[in-house]
Amino acid sequence: MTLDIRTIGIVGAGQMGSGIAHVAALSGLDVVLHDISEERVNSGLATVNGNLKRQVTKGVITQAQSEEALGRIKAAPNPEGLGNCDLVIEAATENEAVKVKIYSGVCPHLKPEAILATNTSSISITRLAAATDRPERFIGIHFMNPVPVMQLVEVIRGIATEDETFEASKAFIHKLDRQVAVAEDFPAFIVNRILLPMINEAIYTLYEGVGTVESIDMAMRLGANHPMGPLQLADFIGLDTCLSIMQVLHEGLADSKYRPCPLLVKYVEAGWLGRKVKRGFYDYRGEKPVATR
């Protein structure tokens, strides 16, 4: 029998965690949201509220649906609050040490049959699973950003992941009215294995003076029919996340074609991480974004 997932826990109330909470609550699931501070949880709840209001304004959902969804999300000030969850999704920063520390704090409070998942976009599921007390009930469930808009979810099994965990995870994603892409446990999986090297190459194109920020983005929007230019997209993802994924690819596959562009490294060292800090390949501090190079 496949585990019926009715209550989910989310560790990390940032952009990804709040987005997962949003779509899960709208789909009728109970959600428990946990982070390292009450302030972060409240910020995540405010983000969900704002995004639901936006959907009501656009006519995507009704006011009643919005209120019902908000009512299904509860804050958990400590890991003990995750004890009744059928599935717990870690949605922390793309840093292996941070994720492993979270598992050590969360696992003792989970019921034995609970599934633990990671929203990692690049790190080995098998290696993360080995740092938990339930590798057979550990899986990668990688949502795309922004979660309320994007329809794809990658599912990645570790070497120890049991069939029941795999089937229950796919059933959970279908409850959210999302599409499943099954990926093997290789660095960066499918989407980022293809997407991030393209972004990295766009940064090399800027670094080598082939084009400006605006010309590179315009070329890919109008010449390749991409909805967003690669440098604009990098700012949206976060340049620190882009660098982390490229480092995972470079180290995991040992191929020089995945070497992070030195300009990407420089921007991250400068703290120019993109939209979240209002400066990256574009400066977002004014009325409209302005290219920084």
Image (cartoon, helix red, strand yellow):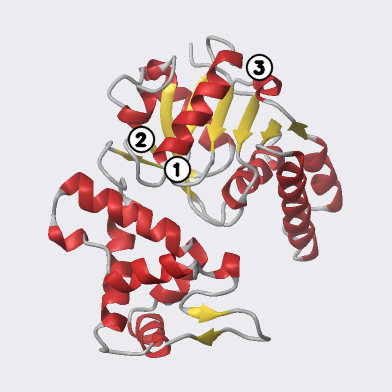
Classify mark 1: helix, strand or loop: strand
Which residue is most to the front? 270
Name the residue tied to disc 2: 156
Closer to the chain start, of discs 2 and 1, is: 1
Q: Position of residue 104 (x, y in %)?
A: 50, 22
Q: Which residue is mark 1?
A: 142
Residue at x 85% of width, y 45% of height = 67
Q: Position of residue 266 (x, y in %)?
A: 37, 71
In the rendered view, tell whether residue 156 sits above or below residue 188: above
Circle 3 residues within 10 Å: few <14, some 14–19, many ≥20: some
**Which residue is at the front of the view, 77 or 227?**
77
Q: Give above or below for 167 relative to 226.
A: above
Q: Looking at numbered disc 3 in the image, what kind of residue is underneath it?
A: Gly
Q: Amino acid at mark 1?
A: His
User: Looking at the image, is mark 2 or mark 3 earlier in the sequence?
Assistant: 3
Where does residue 26 sit, x and y in percent of width and height? 71, 42
Q: Residue 5 — which label?
A: none
Q: Is residue 43 left or right of residue 105?
A: right
Image-based side of 157 in relation to 56, left or right: left
Q: Residue type at mark 2: give it.
A: Ile
Point 42% across, 36% down: residue: 97
Question: Mark 2 and 1 residues: CB-CB less than 8 Å, in contact?
Answer: yes
- Label 3, secondary structure: give it: loop
Q: Residue at x 25, y 51 (%)?
A: 249
Image disc number at residue 83: 3
Give how far across and how far down residue 271 sits, in percent.
Answer: 49, 67
* Circle 1 crowding by C-alpha within 10 Å: few under 14, some 14–19, many from 20: many
